[in-house]
Image (tube, rainbow, N blue to C red):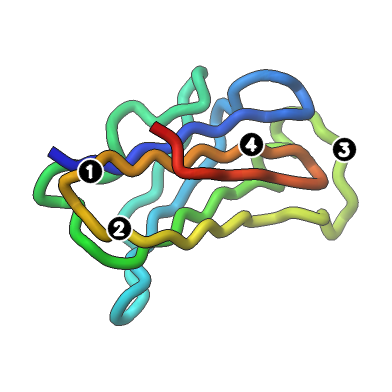
Amino acid sequence: MGRLTTHVLDTNLGKPAAGLTIELWRMDGPEALIKTVATNADGRVDKPLLEGAELKSGVYELRFNVASYLRASGTSLASIPFLDVVPIRFGVADASQHYHVPLLVSAHGYATYRGS
């Protein structure tokens, strides 16, 4: 059974990014917001973003609201932050697989990869 998960780590503070808002969008065809979630104390969401029949082949985008999270965590940012919303667009070719999209983030950079 396929599923889509994510995990966010704050590399500046060296801990999970708790309370970060994430939007999941479907991008092939008309753009459509699927859901909005927030990370828990472990920097994860409480259940898969999509699972089973909900996960279909296609193009998706996760939008991580980084600036809001960083401000709430006490990071000092410019009035116009370097990073605000970090979009990660990715494809799901085989909906029976596990797609894990982690984000490592700080005020001035980020990294992602297909995790396991």
Indicate the quadrant containing the N terminus: top left, top right, bottom left or bottom right: top left
Q: Nearer the viewer, residue 30 or 57?
A: 57
Judge whether 40 appears above or below 108 on screen. above
Q: Quadrant of residue 57?
A: bottom left
The label nearer to you, 3 versus 4, is 4
Q: Is residue 56 left or right of residue 48?
A: left
Query: Please, what is the three-letter code of the amino acid marked with disc 1?
Result: Gln
Indicate the quadrant containing the C terminus: top left, top right, bottom left or bottom right: top left
The label nearer to you, 1 versus 4, is 1
Which comes before the other along the chain, label 3 or label 4? 3
Determine whether the residue tagged by mark 2 lies in a helix, strand or loop: strand
Which comes before the other along the chain, label 1 or label 2? 2
Determine whether the residue tagged by mark 1 lies in a helix, strand or loop: loop
Residue at 39% x, 49% y: name it.
Answer: 36
Q: Residues within 10 Å of mark 4 (few under 14, many from 20)?
A: some
Residue at 87% x, 55% y: name it.
Answer: 79
